[in-house]
Image (cartoon, rainbow, N blue to C red):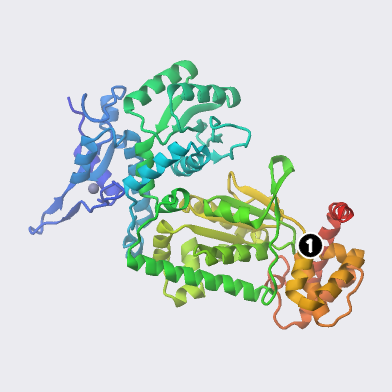
Amino acid sequence: MRDDFPESIKRVLAARVGYFCSKPDCRALTSGPQKDPSKSVNVGVAAHITAASPGGPRYDPQMSPEERSAPTNGIWLCQNCAKKVDNDPNRFSAEMLIQWKHDAELEVDKRVGKAAVSVAVPAFDVEVAARDIDKALDEMIASEEWLPFQRLATRLIQQRYPDLIASEPKKDRGADARAIVSLAADAQGKVLACSLTASLDKVMRDAKEVRDHFPDVKVLIVATPRRVSNQTAENWSKKLRQSYGFDLVVISREDIVASLSRNPVICKTMLGIPVEIAPDISELIGKVARASCEVTAGWFAHRRLAGQPLVDLRAVELEQGGRTGEVLGSGVIFDELMVGRRVVIEAPAGRGKTTTLIQLAKRIGDSNGLALLIDLPEWAKSGCSLLDFIAGTSPFTRSAIDAGSLARVANIEHLTLLFNGWNELSETAADIAETGLRAVDREFATAGILVATRAHSIRPPFRGALRVALLPLTRGERAGYLRAALGERAQELDLALTENRALDELTSTPFVLREVTKLFSAGRALPTTKMGILQSVVQLLEETTEHHNELRREPLSGNSTAYLSALSLELTARGDVTISETGAR
Ligand SMILES: [Zn+2]
């Protein structure tokens, strides 16, 4: 017997997705008017995720008749898609349909009660051809490169299970290592194991390792670029449950291709698949790129950086437990952002956080990427969604780019979001910013996201982020800055700085170096004590008509002397570090 849906459930399923087909690349509207004003037409079907009767597609004998005809087992599709889905249950797994349903409901949920501008935004302007994705995955298997697949699978599966935390594979672990570990919010510990081979043997080995290291894990997710038949997956599942009591989720070729075809950004950035873009969207992307470059130029001009050379700062990776790891150039941060990672830059005042953000934005802009600089306190104050906030800034309003257009571009182009000023947030603003950043983390899953902050008790809410601290300038970097800023006169100042211990130490902070260089250029005598230098800098600041943006903002509230005292305290606090460094050179 068939466990069909009652009429009332059909109506609910349809209404929950706004009468649109739930297949992500279709989204056909399934209801409309008939000639007879008392009638409407319906081309939608409440399809079963697992079949209503034995022998039907995706039939699950474990389910009770009630479960089979419950709304949780239904998905709203147009007639065409319903037919496709039922004719090819191997390609369209129950797991995939549940994901479609979830995505469709989420999309409609975002639109409910909103003006039509967001409705007019198509969910997917671009669909990547399955054969291109297949080819790229085949190449991945052939080259036996495990890391690119691990990154790709992590990215995709995090969209499905947002509670998974990425953990970078250690270099000494081989291709058999697990990729992500999570202590999930639903208390269902999950581990993702990526594998280019995907055999029962491999699955069992992963399971053993997981059980040995993570006793709370209940679900093993195996991702592989190979095809795995339902029968094989069921067989693995059974063995795994018997031996380890784990549930198994297999994400194989079909799933990966389906997710990727809706992810042009991942296809482009992680698989190198060229994605064809319609001319009107290319034009829009060009406009957005120009506006974001204008924003970058504006930051450069307004933050006392105009006309100043930008030093390429080095950073050191902060590992758990306060240890420091490798020294990284800005190239590494750039690369991580381009593959959609989260990065947190920590540094004391004056160490060059803003400069680093501007440099990254410039570099991304120069390589035809899209980077958006965002002042976190300003955004928190605005109470707007991120895209509304960006669309409301002048370079974007001037080009008539609205939030809907930005959303469209974000679906197709890789985006890098650079947030400044986490530590400048007031307590209430910090709550807003935290909630906002969490939403950004979810909604811009493929974007690279960076937050710059002073070391702060509350960390930006990104799990698995790359955390780095900016390093003070070396003498070599300082000399490079001076050459760029002063030309022939550089050597004179460089010598003066090297000969005076206080100056030598203080000018390893880019902000102080910049100001000392200005004093020197203005023909002022260079004070030789720490406080003397700071006071002169303040004086110079107060004489210049255009004050440093930061000086007027919380927590400074115009009190630049206090700011500089704090700066000096911070410099003193890390005195031992500096001395050992100075001693070393
Ligand atoms: Zn459809």
In the rendered image, the vertical position of residue 184 relative to residue 329, given as above or below: above
Q: Residue at x 53, y 66 (%)?
A: 365
Residue 16: % across, % down: 30, 47
Residue 363: % across, % down: 58, 64
Given residues 461 and 381, the one toward you in this image is 461
The quarter of the image holding the N terminus is top left
* Residue 102 in view of the camera: no
Q: Residue at x 38, y 46 (%)?
A: 260
Given residues 355 and 165, the one toward you in this image is 355
The quarter of the image holding the C terminus is bottom right
Given residues 85 and 285, the one toward you in this image is 285
Q: Residue at x 32, y 36 (%)?
A: 72
Mark 1 residue element: helix
Image position of 46 (left or right of 477): left
Q: Which residue is mark 1?
A: 476
Image position of 427 (left or right of 175): right
Find residue 419 and report its image quarter: bottom right
* Residue 296 in view of the camera: yes
Image position of 565 (left or right of 154): right
From this viewpoint, which residue is outermost toward the front? 143
Given residues 137 and 203, the one toward you in this image is 137
Q: Tag 1: residue type?
A: Gly
